[in-house]
Image (spheres, rainbow, N blue to C red):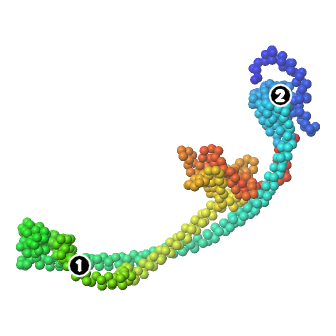
Amino acid sequence: MIPGKYTFSFLCRRTMYFNFFLFLALFEFLIPSSDATEMLRPRGVSVAKAGLYSPSNDFTCFDGSAVIPFLRVNDDYCDCKDGSDEPGTAACPNGSFHCTNAGHQSINIPSSRVNDGVCDCCDASDEYDSSANCVNNCGELGAAAYAEAMKLAEVSRKGNELRLSLSQQGKQMRQEKQERVQQLEKERDEVERVKQEKEYLKSLAEEAERGALERYKKLEEQEREQRRAEDDNEEEREMFDKFQLLDSNHDGKIDMGELQARNTFDQNRDGAVSEDEAKYFLSSTGEMAWEEFQDSGYSRMKPYFILESGMFKPPVDTHEGEGQHQEADKESSSQNAQEEEEDEDDDEGGEAKGEQVQEPADKEEHDAPKYDEETQRLIDEANNARAEAEEADRASRDLTREMRQIQDSLERDYGEEEEFAVLDGQCHEYTDREYTYRLCPFDQATQRPKNGGTETRLGTWSGWVGDTSSSKAGKYSRMLYDKGQGCWNGPQRSTLVHLTCGMEHAVTAVSEPNRCEYVFEFVTPCICREVDDKNMAEHLAAHDEL
């Protein structure tokens, strides 16, 4: 806490500490370096910030909130609001302590961890005044980190060789696609010419077909009209004959007596036609002229004429026909044995014979041409023309679709040297305890239950979203697949793919850090870059600040 106003006791305490800190300033708080040329710096201060802590000058808080005598630095009292005056003690809750970790990687920790009994720095510098008994193991950790760095450098070197090979393949693929586009552009003119020609021939053939079918349709209509006329004439002749038959006195009309003389109209089959039965067919005048017979009378009488002709027979009473059936059975019993023998002989061939008898009629009906020879020829020519036009149109559509797909591929970003082009068209799977995940670069990411079920789209290709702040190649370290299937009462699914260097293409892990947001870890040689001597020196320097 920084007092707003110094009290008398506070000033006395400051005076008492003055000589003490003056003595320690050159010993405890100024750390000597193994290199005699290095600037002395207070505990917990990095080499990069050592110039901000000059013992010969007053110390200015980093946030400018105060200027204090340098002797108050690391006096275990927080004078600066930002805690910059206490880098080596736990006095300020927002301070920062720098672990030099010579031989390994330097780190910064919150100053509240200083002398808390926990070894945070591998060089034990954070526990200089505690009972933690920390040991300096930066040498061992640095050696392990160095070995790991060498291993990663070797993977990067070999992966880079694969990347260069994949880059050559990608460039070759691009060249082949460009040549294919040029070839398709040349073929397109010919395909369109053939398509137009086939469409023209189709229109001619269909016009001839329509003309023939119209003529044939007219002929069919005429034949139908003729058949209807013939049927009408035949029916009219039949009506006239029936009228003449009923008009026994030929006076031009049918009366009740003439109907009663015909058992045809005995509706109840009692052997006589009653007046009521006759009146059913006649009008209220008791007679029927030709016009009335033609309009309505014949239609009422026709069923009885049909019944009389034997074309339709009503059910026979079983008791009345019993004697006749017995007699018929006796007459036919003598023929049963012979018929059974004939049935046995013809059992296998009878059905075939029936088929043979019926076959010519069916075959004649089936094979009978629907149209005359000339009309059928025009129909066949039109069908052939339609088929050829459809084939030409299909070829045009296929060519257009292929050109569009190749153009989309040529416009796609496959990396600075086309190294990612080989991934297009591939799919890689990863299975955990519940799901099988599938990544198809430049297409989509999906998941399906391990034990079967429908596939869920986790996103479709959106683009590269890597960090370009450090290098242009950093752009290709992240892939984004978005606009996947929506979650239940949630957003659409999306997938972020982290790419790291490896000797093969593989999905190594999948997680869902947030609802409906997935992260795929994908190793591939496409992203490998060889670490040169300069980069390796900088990388190793980060592990040894001194």
Quadrant of res 402: bottom right
- State whether residue 108 appears in this view: yes
Q: Residue furthest right?
A: 36
Please tell me which residue lies in front, 210 or 168.
Answer: 168
Q: Residue furthest top?
A: 8
Q: Residue at x 75, y 48 (%)?
A: 470
Image position of 155 (left or right of 316): right
Quadrant (top left/top right/bottom left/bottom right) for the N terminus = top right
Image position of 509 (left or right of 365): right
Residue 353 versus residue 518 in the image, above or below: below
User: Of the residues under marks 2 and 1, which one precedes in the sequence?
Assistant: 2
The residue type indicated by label 1 comes to: Asp
Image position of 258 (left or right of 459): left
Q: Position of residue 408 (x, y in %)?
A: 62, 61
- Quickly name the residue at label 2: 74
Is disc 1 placed on a helix, strand or loop? helix
Q: Residue at x 75, y 62 (%)?
A: 165
Please tell me which residue lies in front, 424 or 127.
Answer: 127
The residue type indicated by label 2 comes to: Asn
- Quickly name the residue at label 1: 329
Is disc 2 placed on a helix, strand or loop? loop
- State whether residue 44 appears in this view: no
Quadrant of res 136: top right
Please tell me which residue lies in front, 87 or 516.
Answer: 516
Quadrant of res 280: bottom left
Q: Position of residue 160 (x, y in %)?
A: 78, 57
Quadrant (top left/top right/bottom left/bottom right) for the C terminus = top right
